[in-house]
Amino acid sequence: MNTPEGAEGYEYAELMICLPPDWRISQEDLQNPDHYWPIRWLKMLARFPHDYDTWLGWGHMIPNGDPAEPLSQQTGMSGIILLPPLEVNEDFLSLDMEDGRTVHFYAIVPLYSEEMDFKLKHGSDPLLDKFDEYGINEIIDLNRRNTCKAG
């Protein structure tokens, strides 16, 4: 990826999305946008740095359109953030290759619009603190609690 000055060493990344065990992924199921959207986001994000001569990394956030619309009819979440996998050993966060390259791993984590607004105002670390407080991880939960909405 075409990383900016100061982000040297982050030119290589792999994206992952963690689906719950009951997520429907048969070929027939993936014809339904409500089941396919995680795969669509993986494909779209994999192409993004190449299509726009840019990069993706820790804390990058992308809304689902402008204005942001729900990722599927099954959830009110309307964007994603890239985070290091939260439920894996720290050894899995990056891979040092024999040729000297380092590959960083990022999980695609869906966000509610209030969480996107919070991240823009306060940064990634305070949002991760809220995730810790509410037990949020990278496993997709379409009905998870919105960490930035009162009530």
Image (cartoon, grey):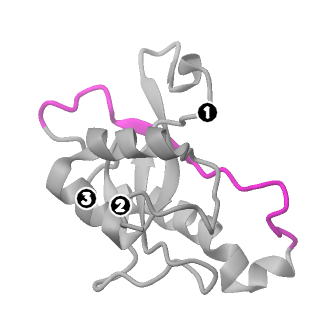
Vertical placement of residue 57 versus 89, above or below: below
Q: Are marks 2 and 3 in contact (CB under 8 Å)?
A: yes
Residue beneath disc 1: 87
Q: Which residues are magenta?
A: 5-26
Residue 79: quadrant of the picture = bottom left
Q: Residue at x 48, y 72 (%)?
A: 77
Amino acid carrying label 3: it is Phe
Return the residue nearer the eye: 43 or 70: 70
In the picture, the quarter occupied by the C terminus is: bottom left
User: Where residue 11 appears, x then y in whole percent?
Assistant: 34, 36
| Secondary structure state at the residue bearing disc 3 | helix
Residue 49: quadrant of the picture = bottom left
Q: Which mark is residue 118?
A: 3
Return the residue nearer the eye: 111 or 44: 111
Front position among marks 3 and 1: 3
Residue beneath disc 2: 148
Dot 3 or dot 1, earlier in sequence:
1
The reply to whether the magenta stretch includes residue 8 is yes
Vertical placement of residue 11 versus 149, above or below: above
| Secondary structure state at the residue bearing disc 1 | loop
Amino acid carrying label 2: it is Cys
Return the residue nearer the eye: 94 or 12: 94
